[in-house]
Image (cartoon, grey):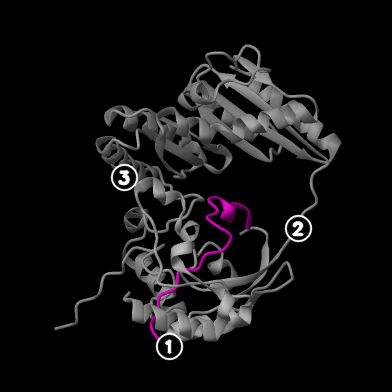
Amino acid sequence: MSAPLAGALHAELRALAGEDAVVDPERAGTLYLDATIDRGLRGRADAVVLPRDAATLARVVGWCCEHDVAIVPRGGGTGFAGGAVTGRQVLALEAVLASGERVELGAAVTKDVAGYALKDLLVGSEGTLALVTRVLVRLLPPPEAALPVVGFYPDVASGCAALEAARTCGAFPALIEYLDGAALALSGVPGDARGAEGAGFAVLVEADGAAEQAHADRELLREALADGALATWAPAGTEGVRALWRWRDGVAHAVNTARGGKLSEDVVVPFARIREAIEATLELGARHDLPACSWGHAGDGNLHSTFLVDPGDPAQLARAEEACEELFDVALELGGSVSGEHGVGLVKRAAVARQLTGPLAALQGAIKHAFDPKGLLNPGKKLPPVPTREPAA
């Protein structure tokens, strides 16, 4: 945008939102950044506005609608897995529509079937349907006890058998996580997990709830994980549990530093097909001459399938992109989805086009059009382009 046009735009926005609400785009660089910077994508803006309240936001959005100005909403930053928390617990929300109108969706009740579930539609919509300004969430008390157990196994087959055992042992684990052998080698085995050196797979589960029930469930889970295990580790005491979670939380960082970069995708498959997805990840890495590994939320069938790269090597990056594209095909062939929790944004649109085809693609496009008929909210994101229909002869 030319300097005169940019100046006029900023003047209009200051009149709507206040002098201090309009930020110099050259000084707002961090607002343009998210994880796609690893793929060479960097955002830009002609203007940056930080509205002080929902009424101000509504005025700005209404002006943008009137003048056909696109808007990229940004909240507190990229939340890779926010939908896994923020969707199940959202009771109601307030939002500003593309027209500038304010609406309230949902209610502080546990049941509501009046009309369509528009609140649920906005959760996870990545700013393509409306701008959320307020959220009413259900708060749950923390459990009396949260007791993790880790099992270490020689290979993928025995590890996946342990995943199944954890699901069917009679306990109700709060989570079931896994690391394959390559991820385990990069992150290391915790020092207190004696006998786990050289393991080719790890399974992490946690029992939580009332203390008595959590302890009973942990014993069931420990017994289930013991079958075929090289070792099991059930840390005792608060510091032991914290040490375990520091280790688990550090996996992504450890993998990323191995070569300086990675391409990681969060595909999801039915639980019964998770072994096939894990093995396919390793096979894709070998075929594209890249170190590969995976870890993730096995209870949900959600894998973080990862290909390690030197970010300064274009050939490696290209091979990793090809491997990711093939990984999406694997996920769909196994009855899954190209994204379990990270979202779609811009880089996964082509993958979504494989999953949402025919009537499904048309329905998704119709929903977008109903909320945002001018296509101004976060344009070019979330959904594949909807092909135009040829006029009838």
Q: Nearer the viewer, residue 130 or 174?
A: 130
Q: Nearer the viewer, residue 35 or 164?
A: 35
- In front: mark 2 or mark 1? 1
Q: Which residue is mark 3?
A: 325
Horizontal arrangement in the rendering, residue 181 relative to residue 50 (left or right): left
**Which picture quadrant has residue 232?**
top right
Of the numbered discs 1 and 3, the one sitting upstream in the chain is 1
Mark 2: which secondary structure?
A: loop
Q: Position of residue 74 (x, y in %)?
A: 52, 65
Of the numbered discs 2 and 1, the one sitting upstream in the chain is 1
**Is the C terminus in the top left, top right, bottom left or bottom right quadrant?**
bottom left
**Residue drawn at (72%, 32%) of the image:** 242
**Residue drawn at (58%, 33%) of the image:** 250
- In front: mark 1 or mark 3? 1
Q: How busy is the neighbourhood of tag 3: few (under 14 within 10 Å), some, or many (20 plus)?
A: some
Q: Position of residue 73 (x, y in %)?
A: 50, 68
**Is the N terminus in the top left, top right, bottom left or bottom right quadrant?**
bottom left
Mark 1 to mark 3 CA distance (whole Å): 39 Å
Marker count (numbered): 3
Mark 3: which secondary structure?
A: helix
Query: Is there CB contact under 8 Å for labels 1 and 3?
Result: no
Amino acid identity at mark 2: Leu
Q: Which residue is mark 2?
A: 139
Mark 3 to mark 2 CA distance (whole Å): 38 Å
Amino acid identity at mark 1: Glu
Q: Which mark is residue 66?
A: 1
Q: Position of residue 45 (x, y in %)?
A: 41, 68
- Position of residue 31 relative to residue 118, above or below, is above
| Most common SS among magenta residues | loop
Of the numbered discs 3 and 2, the one sitting upstream in the chain is 2
Mark 1: which secondary structure?
A: helix
